[in-house]
Amino acid sequence: MRRGTAGTRPSPSWRHRPRERGRRDAVPRLQATGEEGTTTRHDFSELHDVWTRLALESDQADPFCSSDFWQLSFCETLAQQAIPTVEEAAGNIIAFSQLWFKGTLRMLLPLETDWCFGCPLLGRNAPELLAETIAYIRRQCGDFVFPDIAVSAVRPNSALLRELHAHLRRTHDFFLYSRGAQCSASLEGGLDGFLSRRSGNFRQKIKKSFRLARERGVEFERVLPLTPEEAKGTFDRLIAVELTSWKGLGHCGMAESPIRNFYEAMLRRLAEHGAGRVIFAKHEGADIGFIFGGKVGGIYRGQQFSYADDWKRHSIGNLMQIEKIRWLCEEGAERYDMGPIVGPKMEYKKLWTEMDHPIQTWMLRAKPGRVL
């Protein structure tokens, strides 16, 4: 089934050399196809190191979700109709997707558009690179209406927002599209330091829950998949647990397609770089719970946790969180990111975190009659 028509993107050779100002290489138009619920692999592996470094160093609210681990996994599985445009120049990356309609390029969107947790502009001069890219696309495609560019996960009043205005306010109007906030916990001082920043009641409940879990014979297994085969075996175990949880029983969790494809692609990509971290809770040799996430540098980002519905009264979720923090602290991790703090069923995160990171998504619309 035809899912979209691609536009232009720089050749791999262009992405790796410093560009002379005003120079770009002409490239052919491409076509993208995909079927619902499938994975279309996009290979930008040569950019992984610089992409990860920039996600960590460019003051992102959610570095993991600004990395290729999150962005490309989404694009491959949940946005096949969009055409990735990932460009690197002089230590800056822009990571957008082109959305075409009836042969016309209609929008530049972040690679991940469902939650808008990651930023598509990484690096001090990324807004300038975006402005140059827009000009290049216009030269390649000729006269057409280029209405919208979405830039997600921008920190309010940040240097990035100021630079965006500086480079694009002459040609584009800016509209605030949405607001959100991510939350995180410091791991300074190890597990003891983390617990010292929680309430006394929290600490007592955790201590009691661990004692009861030991009495019931609950154990915890750490898994760090390093190959595609290990990632597949680990993911199959995750899904088996998920199917016994309230989310699985209600057909509203990560066992359902296409979100299942997204997390499977992410775990496979994490395994390629040794960045996945999974813990299983076990009872009498059987998996009864899991907690899953990934690392970029010293920052861990939680993704999913779940447990068998018949264990819901035994604080298995809380115990797995503590076991994950214990593991991360042993590795010297600095921060535990838990994702959005605003939204349904997110209130529990306030007990686990002490830092909020506001983010905004901005829509940029070309001014009528202005040359891009």
Image: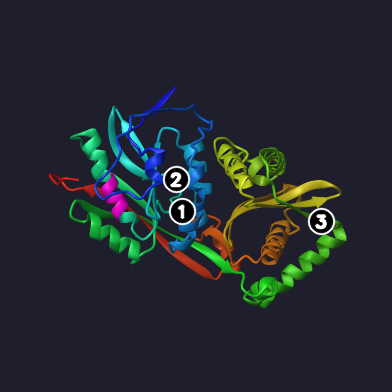
- Circles 1 and 3, Cβ within 8 Å, touching? The answer is no
Relative to residue 304, is residue 362 drawn left or right? Answer: left
Q: Residue at x 70, y 66 (%)?
A: 330
Eye-nearest disc, 3 or 2? 2
Q: Residue 96's x, y, as percent?
A: 38, 44
**Residue 219, labelled with which disc?**
3
Q: Residue at x 28, y 28 (%)?
A: 103
The image's colour scheme reads rainbow
Of helix, strand and loop, which mostly describes the magenta segment? helix
Q: As rendered, which of 216 and 327 lies closer to the eye?
A: 327
Q: As rendered, which of 173 and 209 lies closer to the eye?
A: 173
Residue 95 versus residue 219 in the image, above or below: above
Residue bounds of the magenta highlight: 128-133
Q: Decide which of tag 3 and tag 2 comes sooner along the chain.
A: 2
Q: Secondary structure at mark 2?
A: loop
Query: What residue did someone put label 1 on?
Result: 117
Query: What residue did someone put label 2 on?
Result: 112
- Circles 3 and 2, Cβ within 8 Å, touching? The answer is no
Point out the image quarter for the C terminus.
Answer: top left
Q: Residues within 10 Å of mark 3 (few under 14, many from 20)?
A: some
Residue 286 versus residue 61 in the image, above or below: above
- Circles 2 and 1, Cβ within 8 Å, touching? The answer is yes
Q: Decide which of tag 2 and tag 1 comes sooner along the chain.
A: 2
Q: Is residue 113 visible?
A: yes
Q: Is residue 96 visible?
A: no
Q: Residues within 10 Å of mark 2 (few under 14, many from 20)?
A: many
Q: Secondary structure at mark 3?
A: strand
